[in-house]
Amino acid sequence: MILNRRHALLGSLAATAPLGMAHAEARPVAPSPVLTEAMTGTATPGMAAVVIRAETAEPEQVAGLRRHGRPDLVKTGDRWHLGSDGKAMTVTLIARLVERGVLSWDRPLSRLLPDLAADMRAEYRNVTLPDLLSHRAGLPENHDDIAFFATFHTDRTPLPVQRLRYIKTALADAPVGHAGGTPSYSNTGLLIAAAVAERATGRSFESLMASEVFRPLGMTGFSFNQTPGLDEPCGHIEGRPADRPTDSNPSMFAPAGAMRFTLADWSRFCIDHLKGEKGRGRILRGETYRFLHSPQGGESFALGWGVAPSVAGRKGPALTHAGSDGNWYALVALFPQTGNGLLLVANAGEAMGGEKAVFAAFRSLVLSVADPVEPA
């Protein structure tokens, strides 16, 4: 079982959308010295990064190989698996539906999913969407029945049906905390929120994301397909390309973080959130962006983001997240006050040094993105 395990904080059925959208042709560029150095001493095949400065993305940096055992170099415009960094996108969809009155921040889960109310544990019946999206619903990180989870790799029913099957069982799991209490990171919470959106609209999560978030922001290179083509970067595990069907999470897991994007598309999403803080976002009201970026219950977990006063010795506040399914690693830090940010990806997970390489590159690139923390 491969699940997104990365927490939000840095270092301290209608028609469905197509599985993959055409995107701009990838282009070769000279390898980045920073990324090349960051991969040294690791088994990470390839990396890419984008620096955002004053709400504008700088040219994409790349280095290394798309796939172990093949000569193809990473190119600008390639697609990368973002893991749990996609959670902020799921949250943005939910917020769009709340602004329209389709959903409500205050409505309890027993009313949002009335067909499941009788079978869900009593502890979850009053959970709200902000609880689910800030990891404060008391849910376990993942459903712990590995054999049950594995059945979704071969399930051919519509994805919304699969998600309902998953969460019906997950909502019978014993809670790990109190609803509205101390955060406990949960992929299941995002899957439940997606099922709520699907029930309210009669449309699949994939279709909703494409029409409500991706296309309005000009994101055309997205893919819900977990298996990249031979002409794309591939995730890696155990020293080999992660190209077996069971290497990745099943497709129904997309709301918790199973989507691929070009860095140009990811930048468009992040820049919209940076502008949204100042009331200039394209798809939500200013107060909604600020609500999504606000810590819940006095903690460091916002809705789809972590919030940190500083990152790697650089002054915040910063919106942060890291994501990995074990085959890839992705990291984002945004600094809304300056409009700056940093996005990094690697096509290997922690076991092959992808996390180490990403953090090494982050520590180098962030020096020009954010000011140092002032001495006390």
Image (cartoon, rainbow, N blue to C red):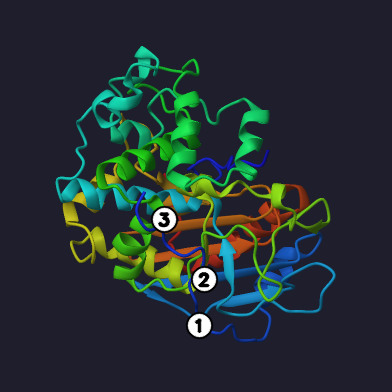
Q: Secondary structure beneath disc 2?
A: strand
Rendered location of residue 165, percent (x, y)? 48, 32
Vertical relation: 323 (above or below) 63 = above
**Which amino acid, by three-letter code, is at mark 2?**
Thr
Left or right placement of residue 226 versus residue 284 in this view: right
- Give neighbour class at mark 3: few <14, some 14-19, many 20+ (Cα, 10 Å): many
How far apart, in angstroms, are the residues tagged by discs 1 and 2?
9 Å
As rendered, which of 109 and 237 lies closer to the eye? 109
Left or right placement of residue 180 versus residue 164 in this view: left
**Which amino acid, by three-letter code, is at mark 3?**
Glu
**Which amino acid, by three-letter code, is at mark 1?**
Ala
Q: Nearer the viewer, mark 3 or mark 2?
A: 3
The N terminus: image quadrant: top right
Q: Which residue is mark 2?
A: 262
As rendered, which of 331 and 107 lies closer to the eye? 107
Q: Is residue 306 visible?
A: yes
Rendered location of residue 367, percent (x, y)? 52, 65
The residue that appears at 43% across and 71% down in the rendered structure is 52
Rendered location of residue 267, percent (x, y)? 43, 69
The residue that appears at 23% across and 62% down in the rendered structure is 283
The C terminus: image quadrant: top left
